């Protein structure tokens, strides 16, 4: 019984490793740099989206969220950020 559990666990570990991405050491810096560039682009796009939301709203977003605890506004801003994250993720993944 114990041996079957160990064998089953090892089989699942081997099966999971088949989907792992193996990167040669010579290309590691290229992948790190591209990841950092895409992270920076994503942060800039998020900041730009939040800035546009703040400028387009006829009220103070900071006051509504921090002082008045406007949950609906927080959900709308979070959904915009998640939507942009999905778009950026799809663009990076191809």
Image (cartoon, rainbow, N blue to C red):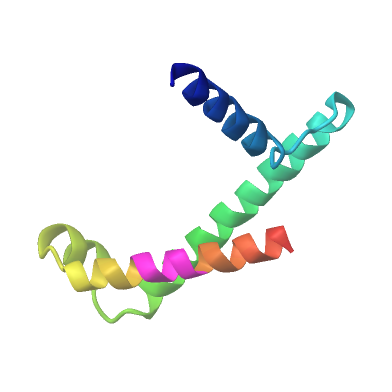
- Where does the image place residue 2, in percent across and percent down from the top left? 44, 18
Asked if residue 34 is positioned above or below residue 92 in the image, the reply reads above
Residue 43 place in picture, x, y as percent: 55, 53
Magenta: predominant secondary structure element? Answer: helix
Is 84 on the left-hand or right-hand side of 70? Answer: right
Outermost residue to the right: 26
Location of residue 32 in the rendering, given as x and y in whole percent from the top left corner = 73, 35
The one of 20 and 67 positioned closer to us in this rendering: 20
Q: Is residue 60 visible?
A: no
Count of all numbered marks drawn on residues in the image: 0
Q: Is residue 4 visible?
A: yes
Say left or right for 74 vs 91.
left
Q: Which residues are magenta?
A: 78-83
Residue 77: name its quadrant.
Answer: bottom left
State the residue at coordinates (74%, 64%): 94
Quarter of the image where one finds residue 24? top right
Residue at the spot x=66%, y=31% of the render? 14
**Residue located at (59% from left, 25% from top):** 10
Q: Which residue lies most toward the front here? A: 1
Left or right of 22 in this view: 64? left
Q: Is residue 80 magenta?
A: yes
Quadrant, the N terminus? top left
Would residue 25 be counted in the magenta stretch? no
Q: As drawn, which residue projects farthest toward the left?
A: 68
Image location (x, y in percent) of residue 13: 60, 30
Task: Left or right? Give the position of 28 relative to 69.
Answer: right
């Amino acid at each position: 019984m114990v041996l079957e559990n160990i064998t089953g666990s090892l089989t699942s570990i081997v099966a999971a490793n088949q989907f792992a991405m193996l990167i040669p050491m010579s290309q590691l810096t290229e992948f790190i740099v591209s990841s950092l560039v895409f992270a920076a682009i994503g942060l800039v796009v998020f900041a730009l989206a939040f800035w546009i939301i703040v400028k387009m709203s006829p009220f103070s977003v900071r006051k509504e969220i921090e002082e008045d605890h406007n949950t609906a506004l927080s959900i709308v801003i979070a959904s915009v950020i998640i939507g942009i994250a999905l778009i950026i993720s799809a663009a990076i993944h191809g």
